[in-house]
Amino acid sequence: MSLIEWLDSCASTNTELAGRPDAPGGFAIAARSQTAGRGQRGNTWEAEPGANLTFSLLLRPHTIEAARQFELSMIVSLAITDTVDALFAEAECLHRAEIKWPNDIYVADRKICGILIENTLTGRHIDRAIAGIGINVNQARFISDAPNPASLCHFTGRRYELDTLLERFCDAINTALSTYEAAPDPDTLTARYMSRLWRREGRWTFATPDGARFEAAIEAVSPDGTLTLSGGRRFAFKEVAFVL
């Protein structure tokens, strides 16, 4: 069972956990209310207090080198999609969770989870990684200008007890990491990630930071996280984004 500390309120669980340099791997800090949660690309994360999971999980990988740190992102996102799918199966819900490159979790074109992983490197190795995770659970209405948020309850029709659900997600991530490190297989990991990729099939509109738009299909995601689009065009994170 994962070691979890709940806070009534904090600005950012990632910041709180960063202030615990001696915490063991697998330790998590969760907040009933998070006032300044951080998302990818500098975005904030909307979460109704007491309705969702906002937490940070400390990971201490032993075999994943700094140059392969995207493997950690794949492990975390796959553990979350597997857990969401298990929850859907229990509710007899036919939807399936997918991963929007690089690591947002989508269901039916709607975002239910955001992940921000901050790594501390020592030489060639990851010393510690803080996975900041926001999962929409029981929130019925969103008021921010985010384009497509949704919650687990929208799809299952159920409300969830947050403490128990958090243990389930943390246990899944910790188990996934330890299992992978016991027998690392980057090719199989990347193949599993690709099988879960949102908008894997078809052509879609993308945009670059300068505002240019173009249509392309996803060809591959490299073990380092680089996205390859049709025509062999390769993009690192923040160099291209889906147009929603």
Image (cartoon, rainbow, N blue to C red):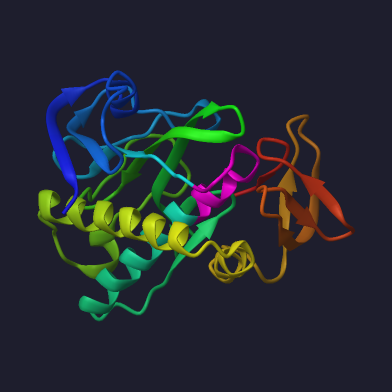
Say above or below: 221 vs 187.
Answer: above
* SS majority, magenta: helix
- Depth check: give the residue in front, 50 or 54: 54
**Residue 19: percent from left, percent from top:** 30, 18
Q: Look at the picture and state if 163 lies above or below 230.
A: above
Residue 55: quadrant of the picture: top left
User: What residue lies at 47% left-to-right and 29% top-to-bottom?
Assistant: 43
In the picture provided, is 93 more to the left or to the right than 234? left
Whether the magenta-drawn stretch holds residue 66 is answered as yes
Q: Position of residue 28 (x, y in %)?
A: 24, 38
Q: Residue at x 40, y 55 (%)?
A: 177
Residue 234 x, y percent position in the rendering: 81, 48
Q: Which residues are magenta?
A: 63-74
The residue under the point 20% across, 50% down is 166
- For the residue pair 156 and 221, the one nearer the viewer reads as 221
Q: Quadrant of the N terminus?
A: bottom left
Query: Where 157 sits versus 17, above or below?
Result: below
- Looking at the picture, tell me which residue is in the foreground, 184 or 142: 184
* Marker count (numbered): 0
Q: Quadrant of residue 188?
A: bottom right
Pick the residue in front: 150 or 165.
165
Task: Find out whether residue 239 is within the magenta segment.
Answer: no
Q: Is residue 225 left or right of residue 133?
A: right
- Residue 113's x, y, as percent? 38, 49
Taking 20 as reference, is 161 above or below it?
below
Q: Residue at x 28, y 44 (%)?
A: 26
Determine the residue located farthest toward the right in the rendered image.
Answer: 231
